Amino acid sequence: MPKHFRTIDAARKQLSAIENSAIDELLAGRIGRREFLRHGSVLGLSLPFLGGIASAVGLGAPEARAEGKPGGTVRAGIAVPGGAIDPVTYYDSGSYQLVFQTAEFLCVTKPDLTLKPVLAESWSPNADGSVWTFKLRKGVKFHNGEDFKADDVVTTFDRLADPSGTSNALSVFKGLLSKGGTRKVDDHTVEFHLDAPNGSFPYSVSIDNYNAVILPASYKSDYEKTFEGTGPFRLESYTPKVGASFVRNPDYWGEKALPDRLEFKFYGDVQPRILALQAGEVDVLDAIPLDVSQVVLGNPDITVLRVASTAHRQLHMRCDMAPFTDKRVRQALALCIDRSKLVDGLCRGMAATGNDSPFAPAFPVTDKSVAQRTQDIAKAKKLMEAAGLANGFDMTLTTLRYSDIPGYAQLFQNFAKEIGARISLNIEDQDKYYGKAVFGQSDWLDSPLGITDYAHRSVPNVFLKSPLVSDGPWNAAHFKNPTYDGLVASYLKALDLDSQRKTASDIQKLLLDETPVIFSYFPDLLVPVRKNVSGVPPIAAGLLLDRVSVV
């Protein structure tokens, strides 16, 4: 028996049937190194172990990056936080970019979408994925000197999953994890007893769910006073609407941060942020919109990190309101769109083409053999005629003033003219568009036709559930399809890749037929940094600055 087979055979004896199925996929050539590491890390296998298996079959490790120079100050320009900063309730980039420096998650996503342990050392599911056990890191202290223990994890997730509270994470945890479902086994072990089996649950307690930072059990909703956490930086000062500064935590449990200090400056709009970067007043920005990217892409003093993302714009059509009760009308509008003009023109080539489902090309389980929907005006007109709308219809599209969305709305308006659909535009400020974010009190959820921004996720679970299942809290399309609901339930509980892929394919085909929502493109995230800056990790979740160096 060849040596590498002996290595793999010895490893197999330690693994469960589900864990071994990942090795089967690798050996059969159905997945490569990246997907093997991603799926194995979700199941709780360590990245060194997985890398050893991949190397044994000839898939060596990627080249390591050089470590940056310690010391100095990193200056970042970000959006003004949207109100008082509270990790339980915040939803805006300006807030979570700050919290990410001082508080930590059980695990974080890496650029290849694998999961890296942080406050959890390891995790594993039971046989059906209904209970996940997390082993917690020992010897960790909060900045206030308290020991990090299981009680902090239990209290954090009970708070986030409390339906009577105001947690922004309820969009993730509804139907997945209830208050009381997080249970202490001992001081360094917790079990998550889920409402339903879930094959990728660790992402829900990772940086992907930006509310899921671990706070002390004693937390009393006064975060701005302390920015309490276990992270590599501690609060130095915070001035609302102006800025914040943090200093290296000398007692950090892990590898000490490279920068001595972080300075964050707040800006009310993206243009002043870009001017500050160009002038050398800041070293790095949070992600910038595509529509202003040309300003920095041609600057010799600035590097733009392009991160393939699953962020997207959902164009919803209310399936319970005419004319969108007829799926032929919904299909016709999807067919009138020239997606190449959106990707190459609106997004300047920095996007992936969408195929009217949340399964972005970046997701490994996406079935890329499903035929791509393209512009077909003749077919769209026939569908309109069959639906009794040969003369078209009048409709208002309501959306928000954000990034490339107004440009998308105008292009869609022009595409729709070709099939007789007369679309007027109502472009609102974000606060007015989202309203109370509940049905009956939100232009987003109540408008018959609209475009909404959705941020990046490393797995499609939230995209599949919240905006598309029958009782989804973000179901702006008012789409109700029991077959779809059943497929999503099957997808979410699947632990093995083969089942996930097959169900993903069925979902993609169903959504292409029903077309409650149009997914035209998935724009890249663009993070600009000065040329003298290194070590910014190219992840879509947000800025992590502990390994950044400025020379």
Image: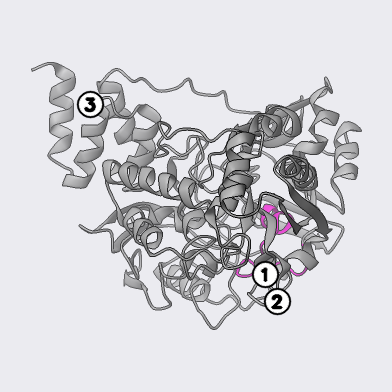
How many angstroms separate mark 3 from mark 2 (CA)? 52 Å
Look at the picture and state if 141 lies above or below 523. below
* Image coords of residue 326 (percent x, y): 55, 58
Instruction: Tell me what residue is drawn at x 22 percent, y 26 percent.
Output: 27
Q: Distance between the residues labelled 1 and 3?
A: 48 Å
Q: Is residue 137 visible?
A: no
Identify the residue at horizontal 53%, vertical 62% (top origin).
212
Front residue of 74/4: it is 4
Q: What amino acid type is highlighted by mark number 1?
A: Asp
- The quadrant in which residue 364 appears is top left
Residue 136 located left or right of residue 521: left
Mark 3 and mark 1 in contact (Cβ < 8 Å)? no
Q: Where is residue 347 in the image (x, y as percent from the top left)?
A: 72, 33
Is residue 93 part of the magenta span, yes or no?
A: yes
Q: Which class describes the residues within 10 Å of circle 1: few (<14), some (14-19), or many (20+)? A: many
Residue on which disc 3 sits: 28
Quadrant hosting residue 278: top right
Instruction: Tell me whether circle 1 and circle 2 mark residues in contact (CB < 8 Å).
Output: yes
Q: Which of marks 1 and 2 is nearer the N terminus?
A: 2
For the point 60% across and 44% down, which residue is it? 334
Q: Name the residue under label 2.
A: 441
Residue 446: mark: 1
The amino acid type of the residue labelled 2 equals Gln
Question: Residue 512 location in percent, x, y?
Answer: 48, 45
Q: Nearer the viewer, mark 1 or mark 2?
A: 1
Check the image and report above or below for 336 versus 63: below
- Nearer to me, 477 or 135: 477
Quadrant in which the C terminus appears: top right
Range drawn in magenta: 82-97
- Give the amino acid type for the residue marked by disc 3 in the picture: Ala
